[in-house]
Amino acid sequence: MAQHWIATDFGGFDVFEFVEVDVAPSKPGEVTIEVRAAGMNPADYKHIAGATDRSILPVSIGYEAAGVITAIGDDTEIASGGGAVGDEVLVFRMQGGYATSCTVLAKNVFAKPANLGFPEAANLLLAATTASEMLHVTKVAEGETIVVHGGSGAVGISVIQQAKLIGARVIVTASESSFSEIERFGGEPVVYGDGLEQRIRELAPEGVDASLDAVGTDEAVAVSLATTPDRQRIVTIAAAPAAKEHGFLIIAGAIPASAAYRDGVRAHLIELAAEGRLVVPVARTLPLADAIEGFRILKDGHPGGKLALIP
């Protein structure tokens, strides 16, 4: 038996339950892992709040985790090759990472870089693949200037790092309390609020090449439209209605093209992390049983880094 977080209905935090479940044995193409850390993301609870298809209930929670292989199906290799009992791995994409143990598709399991702790590894890929796709669809290139709205969050911090590796200049909107973290990774912070457009124009008098919105506020949308001439170089992960209305890009893990890109870039991002060129700041770890507390911290919007649940 394993302990596992599930959602028994759609709605707020009261629909989540911490239950005991049987762990399915590994069939060919599958791996069973003992979870050492589960990555926490706002999507973990937001998707439950907005879902409507009751046929999927109960829903297992958690899209990424890291742990140790305890069983592997016959004639099965993990995505990075090989794989044996005792190997340290990370998993993305999955469903059911908030658990003490789970069986997952081997194609989503990768060897964990030795320089990453389990909390960092468990939080690497959802944010990093999203950030990578934002840069990809807006065609950010060396020498360009981009603006990242909501850049102090997990996706924003990954965007900053990956954009700097490309050779782009990165202006980042955030609260003043986040400035030091943004500067740590090479971003140029600017405080959001009244006058944001003018502050960006003063920082980038030559213009903005692309705008990447990770927060979805009306201000982020308006300033992106005002400062970025080409709407196909504006992307959001949080303002779908505005994207449809104004004709700029929206990406999401549920969109097939997004899912395909993110799956394809996983190995590259793990390699960057293994080389120390992509860092995952972890603000706090919590016991697995305290997932609801973690949700509340995420909903507050200022965790100061990633959160991980530890069985």
Image (spheres, grey):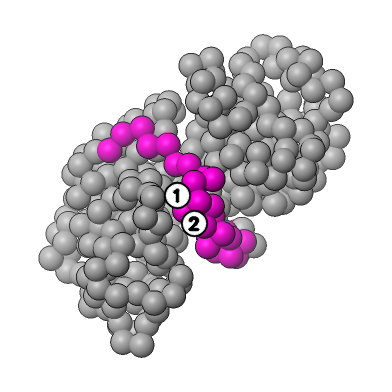
Q: Nearer the viewer, residue 282 or 303?
A: 282
| The residue stretch that appears in magenta | 259-285
Q: Which residue is mark 1?
A: 124
Determine the secondary structure under disc 1: loop
Total marks placed: 2
Q: Nearer the viewer, residue 122 or 55?
A: 122
Query: Is residue 159 shown to the viewer in this render?
Result: yes
289 magenta-colored: no
Q: Give the vertical position of 46 relative to 301 (above or below).
A: below
Q: Which residue is mark 2?
A: 270
Q: Give the vertical position of 35 relative to 308 (above or below).
A: below
The x and y percentages for residue 281 are 42, 37
Kindly identify the amino acid type of the residue bearing the numbered disc 1. Answer: Leu
Q: CA distance from mark 2 to mark 1?
A: 8 Å
Q: Residue furthest bottom?
A: 75
Taking the spot 39% from the left edge, 64% from the top edge, the residue there is: 111
